[in-house]
Amino acid sequence: MGIKAALTGAMLSAVAVAPAMAEFDNGNQLYSFCTSEKTPQFAMCMGLVTGYFEGMKISYDCPGAGPKVTRQQLVDVVMKFMRDHPEDRDKPAAFLAGRSYVVAFGCRPAGS
């Protein structure tokens, strides 16, 4: 067996045993983005937090979030939740953002 074939086999084996991950970022990563003074990282924070909220609104009503809620408000809500619950920051970022919206804006499943 040639070196190229052996390396290819080793790489495929490593990929096959790597655990599948459903979430992209955990709370620690999101917290890092949101506390960064670097523009690209903070922009990532704003984009993620906004995306989590927009995604949640598909199937949840959030009566406490007025029509003029800002991206900065969303960041503030998520950061407050993560500061108040540092023990949970290892959980998926989307989960933590969702929990923060439930607490701050009274979000609940649509139609309930």
Image: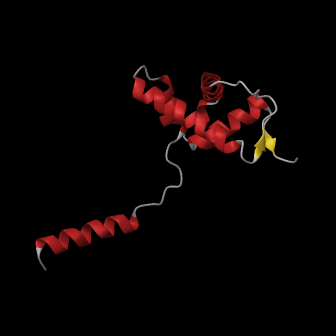
Is residue 92 toward the left or the right of residue 109 in the image? Answer: left
Is residue 58 toward the left or the right of residue 10 in the image? Answer: right
Considering depth in this image, is 88 or 21 the residue closer to the camera? 21
Please tell me how many numbered marks the rendered image carries.
Answer: 0
Up-down: is 81 above or below 15? Answer: above
Up-down: is 73 above or below 47? Answer: above
**Residue 57 falls in image quadrant:** top right
- On the image, the x and y values in percent for residue 100 come to 69, 33
Q: Quadrant of the N terminus?
A: bottom left
- On the image, the x and y values in percent for residue 13 come to 32, 70
Is residue 85 toward the left or the right of residue 22 in the image? Answer: right
- On the image, the x and y values in percent for residue 102 come to 75, 36
Identity of the residue drawn at 60% across and 42% down:
94
Is residue 89 in sight in this rendering? no
Residue at the extreme top of the image, as rendered: 37
- On the image, the x and y values in percent for residue 25 come to 50, 43
Identity of the residue drawn at 77% across and 30% down:
105
Is residue 69 in sight in this rendering? yes
Residue at the extreme bottom of the image, as rendered: 1
Considering depth in this image, is 108 or 19 the residue closer to the camera? 108
Identity of the residue drawn at 25% across and 72% down:
9
